[in-house]
Image (spheres, helix red, strand yellow):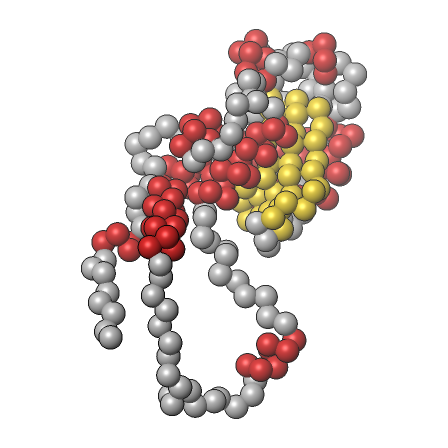
Amino acid sequence: MRQIFLDTETTGLSAAEGDRIVEIGCIEYDNRRPTGRTLHHYVNPQRSSHPDAVRVHGITDEFLADKPPFAAVVDEVLDFIAGADLVIHNAAFDVGFLDAEFKRLDKPRTATLAGRITDSLLMARETFPGKANSLDALCRRLEVDNSHRDRHGALLDAGLLAEVYLRLTRGQGMLVIEASEQATAALQTEAVDLSALALTVLTPSAEETAAHQALLADLDKACGGKTLWRKLEPTKVMA
């Protein structure tokens, strides 16, 4: 599955009132692994940024003066996100700005281009109800190192978002078996009666048991204490 972790920085908070994108950053993953492909552009918004926005991202009008307009990079953006599952923190904000830029250039809307749009903020609110779920807060909670983030930056934030998302969804998508042609052929042969075979049960050592419990505790922490096995009675093993 091809995923794009995407973030933007803008001149202000309202695309409807004419605020524009000043930076876009995207990082590509395939089957939960980084491919090494990224997209990153600073964009001349052809208007001044609000002082509050500059305090957040530090991108000044002077810095953007010689950067290309969005029209110059739009085709590259479209090609990069086309058909991918987009993962965005507070997706309504970024998608609203992307759609406004695309509309000015008579391009399709983001939802039409992408395979799917996932809002990691909504996911976090479901996992951690009633808690702060900003990207910084999630980095702290999920132990993602963001010590190098003194200001917002689109490519930097996209990278942090990827790490946060993988920890939020830990365990999902990890049970896929990549069968070889030989294994596939074996599955198509006649069934073998295994009822006469004796099943050997190996008892874990104390060290292995402790390592297993530590892993379960780590998974439980990442899921916000919602793992179901904590509510189940331990199964007795018959000798």
Left or right: where 171 falls relative to 209: right
Q: In the image, what residue occupies the spot 61% across and 43% down?
A: 4
Work out whether 87 lies above or below 229: above
Left or right: where 50 falls relative to 67: left
Where residue 92 appears, as percent x and y from the top left, is 50, 34
Front position in the image: 195 or 131: 195
Work out whether 187 lies above or below 125: below
Tell me the quarter of the image containing the N terminus.
bottom right
Front position in the image: 102 or 144: 144
Q: In the image, what residue occupies the spot 33% across and 30% down?
A: 131
Where residue 85 appears, as percent x and y from the top left, is 58, 48
Q: In the image, what residue occupies the spot 56% across and 22% down?
A: 149
Work out whether 21 lies above or below 216: above
Tell me the quarter of the image containing the C terminus.
bottom left
Where residue 175 appears, as percent x and y from the top left, is 49, 61
The mark total stands at 0
Q: In the image, what residue occupies the spot 46% across and 42% down?
A: 167
Q: Is residue 47 visible?
A: yes
Left or right: where 93 falls relative to 33: left
Front position in the image: 204 or 32: 204
Front position in the image: 19 or 76: 76
Q: Is residue 223 visible?
A: no
Where residue 113 appears, as percent x and y from the top left, is 64, 46
